[in-house]
Image (spheres, helix red, strand yellow):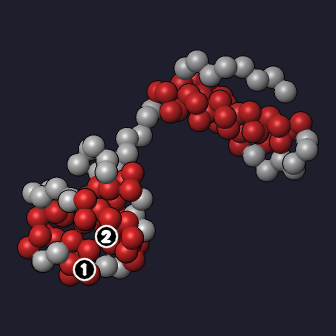
């Protein structure tokens, strides 16, 4: 096992190449340990150099709608009238605390997604 820090994208590509080679390693083997270390190094490098922002509340709602096959009409019980649902989904109205609680309780959308500052 010859592991070194990932300092640039070339190092990252090499780490991915080696990870592919040891990815199916059996637990309690040196290759498995190497796979775990490489995974951690890659995650740290990517989170620092390629951060992924959190989804906006609207994106979170639309994602859950797609997952569950819901229509805007199905959201009326959580948000209010069809006009209000339309305003929320089109970004013209912010979610109220009551809407956030209803969406969390009814559709199991995490509070952190509904309270995201990127709304």
Q: Is residue 97 above or below residue 56?
A: below
- Lateral position of residue 82 relative to residue 37, left or right: left
Q: Residue at x 16, y 56 (%)?
A: 94
Find residue 105 and name its label. none
**x%, y% of residue 97?**
25, 59
Closer to the N terminus: mark 1 or mark 2? 1
The residue carrying pointer 1 sits among few (fewer than 14), some (14 to 19) or many (20 or more) residues within 10 Å by Cα, namely some
- Lateral position of residue 81 relative to residue 112, left or right: left
**Quarter of the figure that contains the N terminus:** top right
**x%, y% of residue 119?**
23, 49
**Residue picked out by circle 2:** 102
Q: Is residue 54 above or below residue 80?
A: above
Residue at mark 1 to residue at mark 2: CA–CA distance: 8 Å
Residue 103 in view, yes or no:
yes
The residue carrying pointer 2 sits among few (fewer than 14), some (14 to 19) or many (20 or more) residues within 10 Å by Cα, namely some
**Residue picked out by circle 1:** 77
Q: Disc 1, disc 2: CB below 8 Å?
A: yes
Residue 13 in view, yes or no:
no
Q: Residue at x 26, y 74 (%)?
A: 78
**x%, y% of residue 18?**
73, 35
Q: Is residue 50 above or below residue 2?
A: below
Q: Is residue 23 above or below residue 48?
A: below
């Amino acid at each position: 096992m010859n592991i070194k820090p990932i300092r640039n994208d070339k190092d990252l590509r090499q780490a991915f190449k080696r990870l592919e080679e040891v990815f199916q390693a059996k637990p309690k083997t040196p290759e498995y340990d190497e796979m775990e270390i490489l995974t951690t190094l890659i995650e740290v490098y990517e989170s620092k150099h390629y951060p992924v922002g959190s989804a906006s509340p609207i994106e979170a709602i639309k994602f859950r709608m797609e997952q569950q096959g819901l229509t805007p009409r199905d959201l009326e019980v959580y948000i209010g009238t069809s006009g209000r649902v339309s305003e929320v989904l089109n970004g013209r109205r912010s979610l109220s605390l009551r809407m956030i609680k209803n969406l969390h309780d009814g559709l199991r959308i995490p509070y952190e997604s509904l309270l995201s500052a990127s709304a």
